[in-house]
Image (spheres, grey):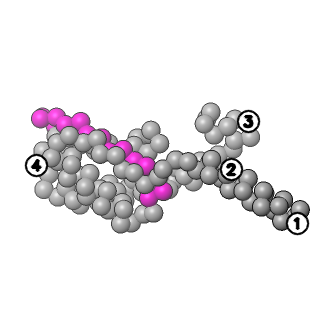
């Protein structure tokens, strides 16, 4: 009986510890675009990402429109820039551009996750690097 209680306490404590580590909600792509071009880019970009990756991360898609240069679209992962591109005001192939951006961003996220796993953190914690 004591072994059963001890095993139950051990299981509950490990599940509580793992739940504390993963409290962050994942799978969000935040739309911070302003213009029609930015919204179209966001919808195509998010459509491609949701169709091709497990979405175990959060992203922010930002846009700074300019009448002269078009729109500067950026994508951030963990508050770091992973994609930046000017979209001209008369973009016809916007869906193809958004799909290519989604594929690029997905590759960059995988690369950054691998880099964090391979970091030597014997002296410092991961957030101090």
Label 3: how many Cα within 10 Å (few below 14, some 14–19, many 20+): few
Label 1: how many Cα within 10 Å (few below 14, some 14–19, many 20+): few
Say what secondary structure mark 1 lies in: loop
Rounded to the nearest angstrom, the CA distance separating label 4 from label 3 is 51 Å
Front-most of 77 and 22? Answer: 22
Report which quarter residue 128 is drawn in: top right
- Left or right: 65, with 79 as reference point: left
101 lies above or below 34 = below
Q: Which residues are magenta?
A: 55-69
Front-most of 15 and 8? Answer: 8
Residue behind mark 2: 17
Q: Earlier in the sequence, mark 1 or mark 2?
A: 1
Front-most of 63 and 12? Answer: 12
Q: Earlier in the sequence, mark 4 or mark 2?
A: 2
Report which quarter residue 120 is drawn in: top right
Residue behind mark 4: 90
Direction right: furthest residue: 2
Rounded to the nearest angstrom, the CA distance separating label 3 from label 2 is 24 Å
Q: Give coordinates of residue 1: x percent, y percent.
A: 88, 66
Residue behind mark 3: 123
Of badges 1 and 2, nearer the viewer stands: 1
- Left or right: 2, with 123 as reference point: right
Q: Earlier in the sequence, mark 3 or mark 2?
A: 2
Say what secondary structure mark 4 lies in: loop
Give the residue at x 24% y 36%: 64
- Residue 57 colored in magenta in the image: yes
Q: Give coordinates of residue 109: x percent, y percent.
A: 47, 52
Label 4: how many Cα within 10 Å (few below 14, some 14–19, many 20+): few
Direction front: furthest residue: 1
Residue behind mark 1: 1
């Amino acid at each position: 009986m004591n072994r059963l209680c001890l095993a139950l306490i051990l299981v509950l404590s490990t599940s509580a510890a793992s739940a504390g580590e993963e409290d962050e909600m994942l799978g969000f792509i935040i739309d911070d675009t302003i213009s029609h071009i930015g919204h179209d880019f966001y919808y195509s970009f998010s459509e491609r990402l949701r169709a091709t990756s497990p979405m175990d991360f959060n992203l922010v898609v930002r846009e700074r429109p300019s009448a002269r240069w078009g729109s500067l679209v950026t994508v951030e992962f963990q508050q770091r820039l992973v994609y930046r591109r000017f979209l001209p005001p008369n973009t016809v192939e916007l869906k193809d551009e958004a799909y290519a951006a989604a594929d690029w961003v997905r590759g960059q996220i995988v690369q950054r996750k691998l880099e964090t796993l391979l970091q030597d953190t014997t002296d410092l914690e991961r957030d101090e690097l």
